[in-house]
């Protein structure tokens, strides 16, 4: 599991989803665009919860760390 933090908000998700958000954020920054993505999320105990919608784009910082 990975903790994905973007613009000061965070969600626990799987490694593939976290990497996909980072990769997409890079591509959006290169073309100076923004987008909203829906990221699957789980609780700290690993139970599924509602997906998290994140606005990603240039000028916003992202952090992914192992939870």
Image (spheres, helix red, strand yellow):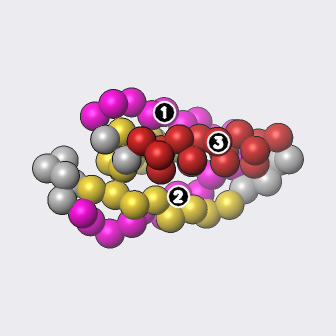
Which callout, 2 or 3, points at the residue further toward the start of the chain? 3
Q: Local crowd at mark 1 within 10 Å, few (<14), some, or many (≥20)?
A: some
Residue farthest to the front, as pictured: 16
Q: Residue at x 31, y 41 (%)?
A: 1
Q: Spatial distance from mark 1 to mark 3, Cα to Cα?
A: 12 Å
Q: Residue at x 71, y 39 (%)?
A: 26
List the residue tagged with mark 1.
63
Q: Is residue 13 magenta?
A: no
- Is 32 left or right of 9, judged from the image as shown? right
Q: Local crowd at mark 3 within 10 Å, few (<14), some, or many (≥20)?
A: few
Give how far across and how far down residue 51 sits, in percent.
39, 66
Which dot marks residue 48?
none
Looking at the rendered structure, the secondary structure element under dot 3 is helix
Give how far across and how far down residue 50 sits, in percent.
32, 69
Q: Nearer the viewer, mark 2 or mark 3?
A: 3
List the residue tagged with mark 2.
54
- Is 43 left or right of 8, judged from the image as shown? left
Q: Spatial distance from mark 2 to mark 3, Cα to Cα?
A: 14 Å
Highlighted magenta segment, given as a residue range: 48-67
Measured along the vertical axis of the image, is residue 2 above or below residue 65?
below
List the residue tagged with mark 3.
23
Residue farthest to the left, as pictured: 45
């Amino acid at each position: 599991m990975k903790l994905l933090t973007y613009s000061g908000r965070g969600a626990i998700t799987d490694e593939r989803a976290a990497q996909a958000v980072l990769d997409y954020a890079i591509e959006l920054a290169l073309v100076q665009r923004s987008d909203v993505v829906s990221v699957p999320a789980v609780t700290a105990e690993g139970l599924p919860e509602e997906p998290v919608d994140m606005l990603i784009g240039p000028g916003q910082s992202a952090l992914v760390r192992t939870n």
